Image (cartoon, rainbow, N blue to C red):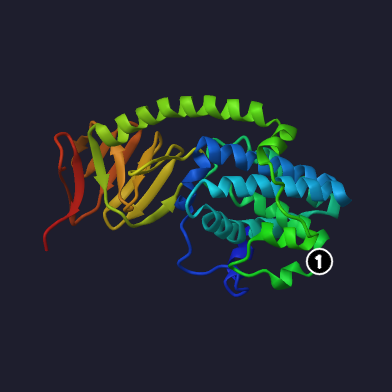
Amino acid sequence: MLHELFHRIQSQLGLITAGGPARAGNEHLDTVEGRVWLRLEWRALAKALILSGEDRKRAVSDAAAFRLTRRSQFANAAENERFEEVREGLAQYTGTVTTAASRPEAVASAILHLAGAEGHETFLQQSYTTGVAYAILLDDASPDWRRRVRSDSDLGQMLMAALDITPLANAVEASARYGGAELRAAEQTRAEERAARMRELRNRFVDGPVLVVPRGGGGTFNAVGATPIPGEGTVFVLPYRQKGEWGALEAMNGVLVNDDGTRRLPGPVRIDGVTLTGDGWTVTVAPGWSVRSGPRSGDYQIIRDPQ
């Protein structure tokens, strides 16, 4: 709850700005390289949290090396990650430290958070996890950092400056201390399995017949397990419910939210008056809107009636 309450005052604190990069800008965190170096950074930060003195500095230097290596491989990665760390990382940090009964409890919570993040199917919204760790480490290294942090701050750079350290020169060599080889092998296996999953999703939501639902409206959905399809959008696999002027949608087996905000539901489409059904989904069309054939054979779309 405190995480969400922090968001209510975040703009007043100057810690969030309009027009920042969208969360979808972190697609690189679902690639093999993005995931490998992010997981290594998490592990180094967890180690830093339980160490002190020069040992902590060495672990932070490792984390910085992994961070730099990852960001150097993808355009705009540093800015997109930084934005998410400030927006969501500081909110999560606030909830973590204010609900902990003691400093050790806050540290333990952050370490559990880092370890738990590795188990997520997708890392699209997990870049902020580093923000919690960096913020707690900054509490020790520079107690006044909260007065100086801004919407364009990089928490990792703030910590390196406070500890007077630089990223370790050889990130590959450092990765061996954190199980880098085994981690990379696991991520390559995951990538192969994900490629097969991607072919399945493309067949259902892109290549096969679909119902196109207009953009707009509001409702509930869960991003856990969401899978981006490059050039198309993101498939949300958990229950997705939305209502808009076009009607109401409930999808239990997946929906593709296109990059333009429209949604695609897999066909074949069954039509019974204003009720449309398909594989695990139901759409009720509102008055003033109709179902029409789509641009491809077998496709349907919901469009507004002519005025």
Q: Residue 151 at what x, y percent from top left? A: 59, 68
Q: Residue 248 at what x, y percent from top left? A: 32, 49
| Name of the residue lying farthest toward the right | 53
Residue 291 located left or right of residue 236: left
Decide: few, some or many residues near mark 1? Use Cα within 10 Å; few <14, some 14-19, many ≥20.
few
Q: Is residue 36 visible?
A: yes
Q: Is residue 36 above or below residue 134?
A: above
| The one of 259 and 159 positioned closer to us in this rendering | 159
Instruction: Check the picture and name the quadrant holding the N terminus.
Output: bottom right
| The one of 214 and 15 positioned closer to us in this rendering | 15
Choose top left, top right, bottom left or bottom right for residue 33.
Answer: top right
The total number of labels drawn is 1
Residue in view at x 55 percent, y 49 percent? 72
| Name of the residue lying farthest toward the left | 306
Q: In the rendered image, which residue does mark 1 sit on?
A: 143
Q: Residue 99 at what x, y percent from top left? A: 76, 56
| The one of 45 and 164 positioned closer to us in this rendering | 164
Residue in view at x 60 percent, y 73 percent? 14
The three-letter code of the residue at mark 1 reads Pro
Q: Residue 73 at what x, y percent from top left? A: 52, 46
Residue 38 located left or right of residue 105: left
Residue in view at x 49 percent, y 29 percent? 191
| Name of the residue lying farthest toward the front | 169
Residue 15 located left or right of residue 64: left
Choose top left, top right, bottom left or bottom right for residue 155.
Answer: bottom right
Q: Is residue 110 visible?
A: no
Choose top left, top right, bottom left or bottom right for residue 41.
Answer: top right
Instruction: Check the picture and name the quadrant holding the C terminus.
Output: bottom left
Q: SS of the residue at dot 1?
A: loop
Residue in view at x 63 percent, y 30 percent? 183
